[in-house]
Amino acid sequence: EDAVRHLREEEGCLIYASDLNPSAKDVRDLVWDVDFDDDNDVVVGGELTGGRVTDGEDGKMHKKQRPICIVMGNEDRGISDEMRELADETFYLPMCGFAESFNLSVATAITLAYMSAVSTRAGDEDSYDLKGP
């Protein structure tokens, strides 16, 4: 609990935890990037965070990426009930075929690759939309 509180309050992290609970979101439906309202205030998932965009050395406005902490549970037991309550969002990886789940290393790799692909990187004008049509 103290670690999550520190990450959220001191580091400004969103906490996303992998979980198979009924209210978990498809990983493709999570907010991986920030938006800005008309006053250039940072908005994540419709919630004002108090951050602001900043002027870069080139005179342009740049997004401040809010850090995200990814929590992956134990292969057998998943995340704890406490972690489920503390997470800002829980998510699952959609699967096709006969497998019931990915092993931990594969699930982590898929999650981080997806997160990297859809997040706007410094200097990029566009982010990627991998959800498809």
Image (tube, grey):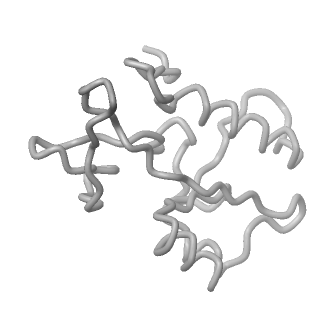
Relative vertical location of residue 81 with respect to residue 108 in this rendering, above or below:
below
Residue appearing at x 27%, y 50% in the figure? 43
Q: Is residue 124 left or right of residue 4?
A: left
* Residue 45 locus on image (x, y percent): 33, 50
Relative vertical location of residue 81 with respect to residue 73 in this rendering, above or below:
below
Residue appearing at x 85%, y 63% in the figure? 74
Q: Residue furthest left?
A: 38
Q: Residue furthest front?
A: 57
Q: Residue furthest bottom?
A: 2
Q: Residue furthest top?
A: 133
| In the foreground, 52 or 73 | 52
Relative vertical location of residue 64 with respect to residue 48 in this rendering, above or below:
above
| In the foreground, 99 or 24 | 24
Quadrant in the picture for residue 60? top left
* Residue 61 locus on image (x, y percent): 25, 32
* Residue 6 locus on image (x, y percent): 56, 77
Q: Is residue 28 left or right of residue 19?
A: left
How many numbered circles are shown?
0
* Residue 123 locus on image (x, y percent): 44, 23
Residue appearing at x 85%, y 38% in the figure? 106
Considering the image in quadrants, where does the C terminus appear?
top left
Considering the image in quadrants, where does the N terminus appear?
bottom right
Residue appearing at x 78%, y 62% in the figure? 73
